[in-house]
Amino acid sequence: MRTFDRAQSFWGFDYTPSNDIKHAYELARPQQFVLTALEALAWIAVGVLALVGVTEGRSLIRVPVAWFVLAVVVSYAVPYVVSYAAGHWREPTLGFVVPFAAVGAAWLTRSESAPARLRRNRAFVLLALAFLIVQTVYAYAVATSI
């Protein structure tokens, strides 16, 4: 259970910047909530687009390179999940995740039928659902700690 919580924390959105701004400017809780929500929504957009890129954008990327990059991200995450994790520890992996998000955005804009095809892709639907559940549970944990 602890390892699951760490994995969730690693892949959950980072709220360190909004927390730093809260303390620096003595923001009220509603003001910090808005900043944290913006951080969460940005990470959710990047994460979902990266999942689109991984599941549907294979024609736009070189597959061996993509598997290597994904292996780098996972191998970076494993020690943190085993020992300790927080959203800000994921930041060095963003350079590897964002290109997949760009591929996902490019794939979505290639045809008008892309969103419908995406909804029929079981791998994407399951991964996106799991990612959104992690973000929701993490948001609850963050909201109760702010």
Image (cartoon, rainbow, N blue to C red):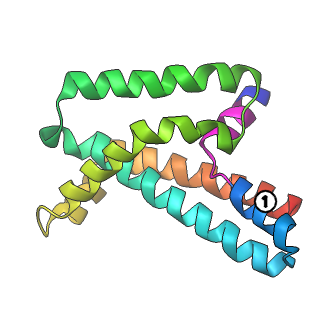
Q: Which residue does the image show at 71% across and 52% down from the upper left? A: 138
The N terminus: image quadrant: top right
Counting labels gives 1
- Specify whether 80 is left or right of 146: left
Crowding around mark 1 (Cα neighbors within 10 Å: few <14, some 14 to 19, many 20+) is few
Q: Where is residue 51 shown, x and y percent of the image?
A: 37, 46
- At x 49%, y 25%, the residue is 74
Residue drawn at x 47%, y 28% is 73
Indicate the quadrant containing the C terminus: top left, top right, bottom left or bottom right. bottom right
Q: Is residue 64 above or below residue 97?
A: above
Q: Nearer the viewer, residue 44 or 112?
A: 44
Give x and y (percent) for residue 133: 60, 52
Q: Secondary structure at mark 1?
A: helix
Q: Which residue is mark 1?
A: 20
Q: Is residue 1 visible?
A: no
Image quadrant assignment for residue 106: bottom left
Q: Which residue is located at x 36 percent, y 27 percent?
A: 69
Can you say whether 121 is above or below 116 in the image? above
* Type of amino acid at the residue the image marks with label 1: Asp
Q: Where on the picture, by quarter, is residue 37?
A: bottom right
* In this picture, residue 145 sits left or right of residue 124: right
Range of the magenta residues? 4-14
Residue 23 is one of the magenta-drawn residues:
no
Q: Nearest the camera: 124 or 58? A: 58
* Majority SS type along the magenta span: helix
Q: Can residue 60 be seen from the camera position used here?
A: yes
Residue 12 magenta-highlighted? yes
